Image (cartoon, rainbow, N blue to C red):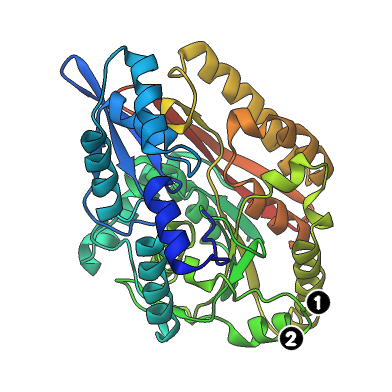
């Protein structure tokens, strides 16, 4: 999602937005309701707690609300699609509901976002935004939950040496808990006390990378940022890597790692460097490698410079909170994946993960980049940057899993890997 900062005059802008409404980037997840399929509309920013549930007809109308179609255009397209007339009042009712849920790119949404940004800027701490939603808010209950994932994963053998870093999922604990357990059972052997956490930003950023110096709160205790490292890093950069700091507010890809990290090292004086990285897909489609993108190139160079100086006196570790493929109706495919497709996907992804194990970044890029439109590997960007800066010589795939939703509409895959400086 990109918020348009280049507004025209307010009156013109409001008029255009009223006549040509535009739906923000949202996710539509199909669910069965008897013999009918409905769609849950999920806002990745989670600005409203309530979820919209719409019919296929309403979803079709939403697909036309792109800022280019007027309400009259929508009526005509609806008539062609369904062979039925729809009154403008019905279309406007849907638009009103979308607006009330802040799902339109308009003045109402931008004003609310500016309020949230200013509120976040004034805070010294980043709240545990998913506590009580994606995991238990009460410490004892949360510890029990996380310990169960670690025990469930004990049947997966991990090398008996400290890893320099791990890959863990960022899918919710309920689905990916065991694979989290595999990653963090391996990480238990680490002696590090400062961890670089590379997370997927599920929203577009102007400079591709977003940093923060805010302390991360968790039900198990607070985890501060290594501000010395961050300050030294940005001091040598022309790019403002705090410009999209607000995206840390609700992003779960780093939060889930911090919670697990605090659980396995409850008495360690932990610090983190949270690094959100957005998609490189549009730049890659133009034929550019990630390190050719100027802000990314600058970040990698300065990270290596500061890391080289500070690793002498600090014990650093690396974590990538990433998921892999996203396929099926919920992610834009016309039909749900079948068993053959899921098996082919597994084979393709095991091949991709083999490049990661060998620390063959060039091979990984050439393997994944051409099929991003089909596989939608949302962890590609943070994983690529972490591999670029992490001083590992070899990785080991510990577990690969797929999570198919109960109704079979879509699938998300994820993996656990550990990296070693051999």
Foreground mark, 2 or 1, reads: 2
* Residue 125 picture quarter: bottom left
Residue 325, percent across and down?
Answer: 55, 34
Secondary structure found at label 1: helix
The residue closer to the viewer here, 419 or 191, is: 419
Evaluate if marks 2 and 1 touch, with contact meaning CB atoms under 8 Å apart.
Answer: no
For this view, does 231 lie left or right of residue 413? Answer: right
Q: In which quadrant of the rendered image does the C terminus lie?
A: bottom right
Point 60% across, 46% down: residue:
417
Q: Distance between the residues labelled 2 and 1?
A: 15 Å
Q: Earlier in the sequence, mark 2 or mark 1?
A: 2
Residue 414, percent across and down?
Answer: 52, 39
Q: Name the residue under label 1.
A: 308
The residue closer to the viewer here, 281 or 415, is: 281
Point 18% across, 14% down: residue:
35
Tell me if I can see residue 256 in this picture: no
The residue closer to the viewer here, 78 or 159, is: 78
For this view, does 166 lie left or right of residue 387? Answer: left
Residue 344, percent across and down?
Answer: 59, 17
- Vertical order, 341 against 254 (above or below): above
Q: Which mark is residue 321?
A: none
Query: Callout 1: few (<14), some (14-19), or many (20+) C-alpha neighbours within 10 Å?
Result: few
* Residue 126 picture quarter: bottom left
- Vertical order, 151 against 87 (above or below): below
Q: Residue 235 carries which label?
A: 2
The residue closer to the viewer here, 378 or 146, is: 378
Point 43% across, 19% down: residue:
336
């Amino acid at each position: 999602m990109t918020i348009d900062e280049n507004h025209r005059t307010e009156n013109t802008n409001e008029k255009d937005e009223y006549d040509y409404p535009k739906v923000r980037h949202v996710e539509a997840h199909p669910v069965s309701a008897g013999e009918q399929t409905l769609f849950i509309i999920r806002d990745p920013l989670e600005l409203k707690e309530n979820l919209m549930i719409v019919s296929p007809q309403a979803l079709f109308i939403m697909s036309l609300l792109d800022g280019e179609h007027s309400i009259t255009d929508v009526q005509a397209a609806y008539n062609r699609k369904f062979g039925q007339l729809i009154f403008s009042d019905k279309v406007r009712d849907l638009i009103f509901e979308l607006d009330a849920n802040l799902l339109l790119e308009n003045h109402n949404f931008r004003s609310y976002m500016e309020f949230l940004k200013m509120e976040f800027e004034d805070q010294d701490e980043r709240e545990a935004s998913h506590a009580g939603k994606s995991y238990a808010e009460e410490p004892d209950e949360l510890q029990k939950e996380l310990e169960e994932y670690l025990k469930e994963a004990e049947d997966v053998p991990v090398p008996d040496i400290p890893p320099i870093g791990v890959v863990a999922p960022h899918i919710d604990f309920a689905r990916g808990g065991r694979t989290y357990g595999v990653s963090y059972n391996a990480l238990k052997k680490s002696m590090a006390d400062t961890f670089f956490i590379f997370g997927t930003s599920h929203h577009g950023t102007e400079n591709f990378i977003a940093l923060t110096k805010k302390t991360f709160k968790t039900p198990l205790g607070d985890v501060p940022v290594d501000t010395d490292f961050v300050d030294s890093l940005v001091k040598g950069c022309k790019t403002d890597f705090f410009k999209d700091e607000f995206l840390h507010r609700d992003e779960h890809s780093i939060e889930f790692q911090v919670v697990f990290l605090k659980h396995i090292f409850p008495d360690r004086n932990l610090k983190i460097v949270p690094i959100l990285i957005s998609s490189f897909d549009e730049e890659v489609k133009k034929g550019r490698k990630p390190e050719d993108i100027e802000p990314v190139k600058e970040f990698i160079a300065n990270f290596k410079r500061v890391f080289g100086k500070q690793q002498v006196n600090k014990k650093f570790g690396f974590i990538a909170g990433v998921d892999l493929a996203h396929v099926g109706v919920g992610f834009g495919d016309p039909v749900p994946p079948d068993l053959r497709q899921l098996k082919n996907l597994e084979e393709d992804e095991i091949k991709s993960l083999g490049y990661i194990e060998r620390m063959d970044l060039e091979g990984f890029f050439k393997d994944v980049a051409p099929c991003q439109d089909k596989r939608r590997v949302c962890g590609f960007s943070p994983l690529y940057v972490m591999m670029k800066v992490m001083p590992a010589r070899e990785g080991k795939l510990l577990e690969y899993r797929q999570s198919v939703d109960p109704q079979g509409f879509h699938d998300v895959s994820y993996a656990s890997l550990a990296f070693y400086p051999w």
